[in-house]
């Protein structure tokens, strides 16, 4: 199915519960999210890349791994996940109270 913002929130909540309670690694396939927000009026090549990067940055906060899709998506997906992870580490290491739930 296609993932929308509400279902993405439920997926991430479920991941957090499983990771906390069972200590299992968790991950998701956020590429399904891209299909709902496609627009034929926008430059598909670049618009899709930015949408992919933005959604990967969200799921990287609560996922141990990400199914990012085809190998062509690796560049945006990996760099986005890296930036998100580094940002999360800065918040944690500097004891910044930005998102109490993360």
Image (tube, helix red, strand yellow):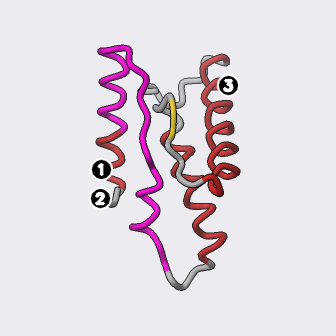
Say if the magenta span includes residue 19: yes
Q: Nearer the viewer, residue 64 or 96?
A: 64
Residue that mark 1 sits on: 7
Q: Residues within 10 Å of mark 3 (few under 14, many from 20)?
A: few
Look at the image and tell me in which quarter the N terminus lies: bottom left
Residue 1, numbered circle: 2
Asked if marks 1 and 2 touch (Cβ < 8 Å), the reply is yes
How far apart in space, not on screen, are marks 3 and 1 (Cα)? 28 Å
Q: Residues within 10 Å of mark 2 (few under 14, many from 20)?
A: few
Q: Nearer the viewer, residue 91 or 67?
A: 67
Asked if marks 2 and 3 touch (Cβ < 8 Å), the reply is no
Q: Which range of residues does the magenta coloring cover?
A: 12-39
Q: Residues within 10 Å of mark 1 (few under 14, many from 20)?
A: few
In the displayed structure, would residue 15 be above or below residue 32? above
In the displayed structure, would residue 96 be above or below residue 65? above
Rendering coords of residue 52 (x, y %): 56, 56
What residue is at 47 percent from the left and 73 percent from the top?
38
Residue 90, numbered circle: 3
What residue is at 65 percent from the left and 49 percent from the top?
74
Q: Is residue 50 left or right of residue 32?
A: right
Q: Nearer the viewer, mark 2 or mark 3?
A: 2
Rendering coords of residue 101 (x, y %): 41, 27
């Amino acid at each position: 199915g296609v993932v929308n913002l509400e279902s993405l929130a439920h997926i991430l909540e479920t991941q957090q519960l499983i990771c906390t309670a069972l200590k299992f690694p968790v991950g998701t396939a956020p590429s399904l999210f891209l299909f709902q927000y496609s627009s034929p009026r926008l430059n598909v090549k670049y618009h899709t890349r930015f949408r992919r990067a933005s959604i990967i940055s969200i799921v990287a906060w609560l996922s141990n791994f990400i199914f990012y899709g085809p190998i062509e998506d690796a560049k945006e997906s990996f760099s986005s996940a890296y930036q998100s992870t580094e940002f999360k580490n800065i918040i944690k290491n500097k004891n910044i109270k930005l998102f109490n739930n993360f």
